[in-house]
Image (spheres, rainbow, N blue to C red):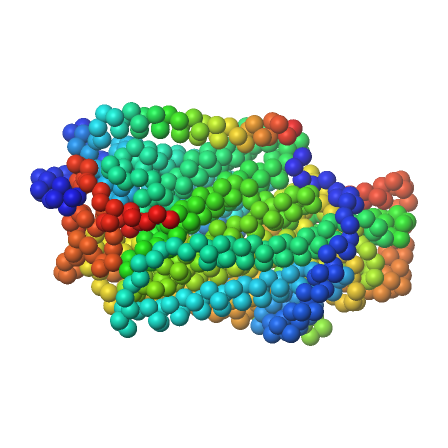
Amino acid sequence: MASQVAEGQPGQAHRHGVRRTVVVLAIVVGAFFLLPFVQILLMK
Amino acid sequence: MTSGSIRTGRAEPGRGLGIRHAVAAALAPALALFAGFAQANPEPGQLNMTRGVTTWSGEPYFLNNVALGVCVVIGIVVFGAMFIAMFRFRKSRGAVPEKWSHNTTVEIIWTAIPVLILMALAWMATGGLVSFADTTGAQMTIKVTGYQWKWRYDYVDYQGKPVSKVGFMSRLDELSDKTRQLHSGLDPYAVTTDGYNTYLLNVDKPLVLPIHTKIRFVITSDDVIHSWWVPSFGWKMDAIPGIVNSAWTNINVPGTYRGQCAELCGQDHGFMPIVVKAVPQEDFAKWLAAQEQANAPAPAATPAAASTAAAPAGHG
Amino acid sequence: MAHEATHDQHDHHHAPQGFFQRWVMSTNHKDIGTLYLIFSLTMFFIGGSFAMVIRAELFKPGLDLVQPYFFNEMTTMHALVMIFGAIMPAFVGLGNWMIPLMIGAPDMALPRMNNLSFWILPFAFALMLSTLFLPGGGPAGGWTMYPPLSLQSGSLAYVVFSIHLMGISSIMGAINIIATILNMRAPGMDLLKMPVFVWSWLITAFLLIAVMPVLAGAVTMLLTDKYFGTSFFNPGGGGDPVLYQHVFWFFGHPEVYIMILPAFGIISEIVPTFARKPIFGYRAMVYAIACIAFLSFIVWAHHMFAVGLPLGADIFFMYATMLIAVPTGVKVFNWVATMWGGSMTFETPMLFAIAFIILFTIGGFSGLMLALVPADFQYHDTYFVVAHFHYVLVTGAAFAIMAATYYWLPKWTGHMYNEFWGKVHFWCSVVFVNVLFFPQHFLGLAGMPRRIPDYNVAFANFNMISSIGGFLFGASQLIFLGVVVHCAFFARKKAADRVWEGAKGLEWTVPSPAPHHTFEVPPVVRDEELAHGHVND
């Protein structure tokens, strides 16, 4: 499986870009998960 | 609180009425095509919304017709252009594809024209909305409470005087209830009242209301969310536990008006209809007095209780 | 050129031989895309069978087949399965297959996460569908799960957990797509040269990332309300049931655009191909999608006009909702303008695309009518709404998915599907879907509420017509299944690399069927080969 992944993998520069994108998006996901809870706390 | 709380008067009724009437006059011939006929209750084969029987119920009907007319016209233009294109620019007719893919002028035109149409529609809709939001000046208050799966009506006040202990449950009539059971073997077409089929649209005790009276409804629920809807009145309003919503109506024509719960509320959601019997004011006053009389033998309750006569105890 | 770059290599990179290794452990975007599409087709038929139960019960007045509670389970499950099981995975599958091919990438940016995103789904749906066979039954409070009603259901925990799983799957899929599009494009594939389908998926993925966590939060609160004594939505404890609706529709409205924006992208690929003319107003199309996506975040309360919103909120949400008609109109006009002056042929994908434009627009018209609040007081929660959203979701999203399937199936399988049976499928579908849904407008206008198992005899005639249309539309989809299976396994006619005469874009430069690995060396992008490469507007 590892070799299979390696075949289709992008180069090193791409990997940095991918990593940065994923980190930013993960933070966005976390923020939006908390949004309804925050909204409810603010409303009460 | 995001919503709920009883609406207090903040409306300027009548704004926008002029333009709406002008448009109505202009569109009248076009509307006649699909305007249908004003009905009190659903009819087999009915194609359009009811005009309704209240002072306000013409608003949704009018907006529905205007919006439908606008959509039909736009549809004819757009689909017409499409079908012309499909006919003229076929490869089998030897059409040679052109190269252009941009035209600023037409793009501006077909962005601007919809904006103008939408502004006109928005103006008309806002007028109807503002007049609906104005529940001030009501001569009567009815409290509506939704239950799984029946309605409770309490008469709170009438002509400025509190009503003493008039309130009752209203649920699906017995014949409909028997007929609607799975594999009942009974014929839904046999459930009629006054020559009109009332299968699932009849109750044991209808809500009796006077005509030519501005009636304020306060609507809430005791368990899950329901929605109180009589199409002839032109609106529905959710009955939500913990929240009191308000709405109003002013019926013009005596008659019996039927509706149904419009918010999924559990297994018997389809079986909690609403029936309103609108009667002349004199008849209503007599009816109300009789009801108060009938409930009088228990005068122990404090007068204050009358205004919040929910008291569902004992009404399983 | 891409063709030469891949040709000498693909022979040496076959798919793994073992079935388990190839399909269960796959990290290949094409295999995972296929898995998504098969899953989606399966769910389409499961959800469709629920719809058949609904239409059979509504065939005539009187309860003849099922108990009301079971009917409610059917309406709820039909929606959940079709939305989360059929439409969304189909678009993810199409994105998986086509996005790397369209932007010249060797694979998705995160191939192992791609595998996980898919394999969560069968478990999530097994969990959700299992509730139908458990004592107490499945969820029956509608797919919107409004409390307090949804809190009465014994299967809430199952549904919440499976929605969490689907949400995780969607979020990972969306992250993968964004990471792929932003980082893996071949040199020369500028953002504004990308196919509209790729653009539509990029924007859709951002919507998913923003709203799936909100849904997860909302259903988590339902769960704690039911089992852990909290009172987020319980009025008895100071909570507010309407607040759930605000949170839910903050998810729910972008969600309905998640189900239509990739469809816009698909149609924007197909129409230029068969009109043999570049898409009209490429940039306007992209900006319109972005504009619709933005507006989707500020219109949620138009699903709640009957809850008793303050007047100001009613007005704001009405205006914002009506505004959506402008970018949507621009898209429709641009498709028509793309056809104008073209040289059209009408193969099955084009037929579905044209039906999409007309019927989706009809759904848009009823949407505009629904936006007018006073009229919505009448329409809300009636069959008029049911007709509206089936026009945009069945003749919109589902038709676009079928169009895309016919369009790219030869590229996937290497064989042409049977054009005759494709057209039979199209004409049956387009006729019966209108027999099915058009009368529902009249039912709603006459006053029939949605989600009821039985009705007054005044509604009998149109319900019977609708049910007949429903059965025939359902049966027509078996033709679709037949055409796809035939094309995948039995078709003899080889497909060319450039399957359609007017097709442009990198996906048509690779052989048919697309080899297991493509673009391992980034292709040299030449603008005239792209659908919009040389376009400056």
- Rendered view: C171 above or below C442: above
Q: Quadrant of the N terminus of chain B?
A: top right
Q: Is residue C516 left or right of residue A33?
A: left
**Residue at image coords 17%, 47%:** C510
Q: Is residue B307 left or right of residue C12?
A: right
Percent across and percent down for residue C466 are 47, 66
Percent across and percent down for residue B71 are 54, 63
- Rendered view: C380 above or below B186: above
**Residue at image coords 22%, 31%:** A10
Q: Is residue B88 left or right of residue B161?
A: left
Q: Can you see residue C242?
A: yes
- Rendered view: C343 above or below C389: below
| C369 vs C224, nearest the viewer | C369
Q: Is residue C51 left or right of residue B269?
A: left
Q: How many marks?
A: 0
Percent across and percent down for residue C168 are 39, 34
